[in-house]
Image (spheres, grey):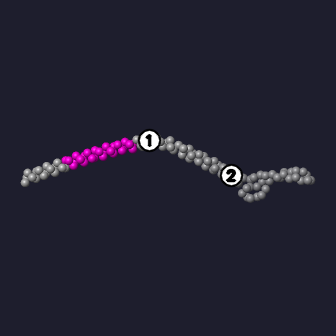
Amino acid sequence: MLINTIEELRNALTRQEQEAAFMEERLKRDHDDLQKRYQASELRYNELVTQVPESTRPLLRQIEAMQVEEQRGAALGQRWRSTDSAPTYFSTIYLCPQIGPFVRWGGRGLRDGAAP
């Protein structure tokens, strides 16, 4: 009976050693696979880092052009606003049979709606 128990314990120990060896091999393969995937992702990351400036350059140029146009539009709008509030001068040439041609000068602000 003691001999049978010893034999069973030896068999159980052998099975556990085999299972541990199998699991160790599997974990080594997983580790190697993860290491390869990590190296591949590092390589891909480095490629992307070098490609980003090249691929974003056209977009940056487009954004800069849009900003310049926006600034020009704002400046033009400011000029229009200042023109709208400034008086506008005009002249009219009349032909009078008694005295001949003459020029009438006048002024108005565009916002007050006065006609020339």
Q: Percent position (x, y) of residue 24?
A: 25, 46
Mark 2 or mark 1: name the one nearer the start of the chain.
Answer: 1
Marks 2 and 1 sit apart, C-alpha to C-alpha, by 50 Å
Q: Which residue is mark 1?
A: 47
Q: Percent position (x, y) of residue 83?
A: 70, 52
Callout 2: SS: helix
Identify the residue shown where x is 79% and y is 56%.
Answer: 116
In the displayed structure, does residue 116 sit left or right of residue 95?
left
> From the viewer's perspective, is the residue at label 2 or at label 1 nearer?
1
Q: The residue under label 1 is which amino acid type?
A: Glu
As for residue 7 lying within the magenta part, the answer is: no
In the displayed structure, does residue 12 sit left or right of residue 25?
left
Label 1: how many Cα within 10 Å (few below 14, some 14–19, many 20+): few
Q: Percent position (x, y) of residue 7?
A: 11, 50
As for residue 32 lying within the magenta part, the answer is: yes
Callout 1: SS: helix
Q: Is residue 46 above or below residue 1?
A: above
Q: The residue under label 2 is which amino acid type?
A: Trp
Q: Which residue is mark 2?
A: 80
Identify the residue shown where x is 28% and y is 46%.
Answer: 27
Q: Main secondary structure of the magenta part?
A: helix
Quadrant including the N terminus: bottom left
The span picked out in magenta is 17-42
Q: How many marks?
A: 2
Give 78 or 57, whichever is nearer the viewer.
Answer: 57
